Image: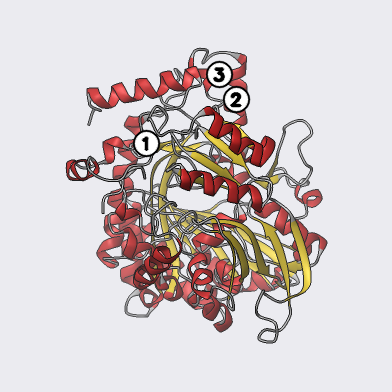
Amino acid sequence: MKPSTQSLSRQRRRLLQLAAGLPIFSSIWEPLLTPAHAAVASNALSRVRPGDPDWPSESQWNALGKQVGDALIKVQSPLTACVNAPDSAACQQLFKELKNPYFLSDEVGLTQTLGWVDAWTSTPSVYAVAARNTTDVVAAINFARRNNLRLVVKGGGHSYQGNSNSPDSLLVWTRRMNSITVQDAFVGTGCQGHASPVRAVTVGAGALWAHVYDAVTTQAGGYVQGGGCLTVGVAGLIQSGGFGSFSKAYGLAAGSLLEAEIVTADGVVRIANACTNPDLFWALKGGGGGSLGVVTRLTLRVHELPETFGAVNMTIKAASAPAFRRLIGLMVDFYHRELMNPHRGEQIRFRRDNVLAISMVFQGLSRSEAQSVWQPFMDTLAAAPDDFKADFPPLTILALPARTLWAPAMLKKLPDLISTDDRPNAPVDNVFWSGNTGEAGQVLHGYESAWLPAALLQDDQRQTLADTLFAASRQWGVSLHLNKGLAGAPAEAIAASRDAATNPAVLDAFALLIAGMEGPPAYPGIPGHEPDTGAARRNAQAIGRAMDEVRKLVPNPGSYVGESNFFNANWQQAFWGSNYSRLLTVKDQYDPEGLFFVHHGVGSERWSADGFTKLV
């Protein structure tokens, strides 16, 4: 479907304003408003934009600047350099830098994902407070509330939903709040006498997981449950629930949250833990980032470090579609029999070209122990050489001392697995998995996820599950993220995750099924660097058809808020299930006027799609 003339006009106006370095007055969200919403919006409370009579004057912005010092930034997108000179050396260098996630996280005007075709485009705020401390955050929130501004919060900037950016807004940017302190005996505020001291790590909201893992594991010999992607921000992941490679052993990352400091909409600094503001504490554990306030500091439980971490990789090509259907069945049976336990995590992928790709991890096992588990599956494949061909070597198993997994010096010896921040004078611990390079600066075409209940692995259901995975793979490749479903996890991990706001469907799921596609860094209106909208729409349709096959088996699946479909109409139920009504109650208590808005966040149904106009 071609965009309307009106839509094209908006795009041209947005691009011209970007080129001039001016605030973007027209919202990219307007095409998503229904006529009914537009009619209601015309008579409803609206936040102010640049050019409106109530937009803060220069003297008011200067006053905020005096409060926060050099933390107040007038934001200009680096993409401005490419608007009129797309072939320039500066533009070419910028698009190279867009593949460096550390460059993206350190740039106030950019986000890790540059957009989602037909959904949103990364657009900078007018001003940002690059907060250095909680006092700066308080000043920004009070200024936004008093002046009726659209407020945005960004830490690592990894939101697929576009929630780390909004035009015509004030941004609270927490990236500079990145301190990391390991504590041997932490007791939460108000919990003295009610809780035993535990080992913990206290982290600033802007810290990235690569640096937290290095501090906790490499330097302190402990383990903290965080994200698999090393450049994800700590605060955003915890508030989304959070999964890492070893969540099958340790549960949701949010399940390890002991305490948070948060600034709420009234500008009050609050402590949230099991003893102080316990309702807010519960909501922060998976209720979604940016909906309840600005988290400034988190304290997380440090677990005992296992002796080993390891990885298993294998790629198998089936000779035909019927052989691939059989291969999927063999894999599902083997997973149920041997792999659904706390030792293992990560992915099994089913591709359209009849390829099964295994990229799994393990913890607490030796290499020989891991090999012995996989050997029966390898023997089954070897018994059918005409049907199945494995890459050489057919099975790669790596095991290493757990304390070295995130050590930058060790990782840099693995250039096939690790990339580094190649900017001059970049910190030596700025490393990231090469497998995540495709996500840096990406433009999403489509993305969907669904939790698959463990009941599908019962004897009378496994073949139906395998047939569904095969049918989905005829439309688009799908992957099972086995660490993102907690069935098979230890009881204590289940209990900690149950006491979180994330959809309870995760507790009984054996995996999160994901289907998605992205394109390289691109931006509308920059010649030679524009998104391929035609391919994006075709890919999105194919992803939708694959998920239609999945929904035949699981009609109303839960979905992980951090990795989900932008257009999910049933998002309240999908993201939070039976927890949503309780989350809305907490929202009403701490943010009754809706200062904090994110797309498909708690209470967002009360606002227009851009978060500027109150509907109810």
Which colouring convention does the figure follow? secondary structure
Query: Could you tell me how far apart the alpha carbons at marks 2 and 3 are, in whole angstroms?
Result: 9 Å
Residue 117 - label: 1
The three-letter amino acid code for the residue at tag 3 is Ala
The residue under label 2 is: 94
Mark 2 falls on what kind of element? helix
Pointer 3 residue: 81
Q: Which of marks 2 and 3 is nearer the N terminus?
A: 3
Q: Residue 608 at what x, y percent from top left? A: 30, 45
**Which of the two marks, 3 or 1, is nearer to us in this view?**
3
At 66% across and 86% down in the image, what residue appears? 194
- Residue 68 visible, this angle: yes
Q: Which amino acid does label 1 sit on?
A: Val
Q: Give the percent coordinates (x, y) of residue 329.
A: 39, 67
The quadrant of the picture occupied by the N terminus is top left
Are circles 1 and 2 on residues that touch, CB within 8 Å?
no
Choose mark 2 or mark 3, whichever is in front.
3
Tag 2–tag 3 contact (CB < 8 Å): yes
Of residues 362 and 372, which is closer to you in this image?
A: 362
* C-alpha span from label 3 to label 1: 22 Å
Secondary structure at numbered mark 1: loop
**Res. 525 in view:** no
* Label 1, residues with CA under 10 Å away: few <14, some 14-19, many ≥20: many
Identified at 25% across, 28% down, the residue is 3
In this view, 245 is above or below 49? below
Q: In screen coordinates, is 178 left or right of 345? A: right
Q: Is mark 3 on a helix, strand or loop?
A: helix
Of 540 and 111, the residue lying toward us = 111
Q: Residue 59, located in which quarter of the rendered image?
A: top right
Q: Would you call the spot at circle 2 few (<14 residues within 10 Å), some (14-19), or many (20 or more)?
A: some
Spatial CA distance of label 1 from label 2 is: 21 Å
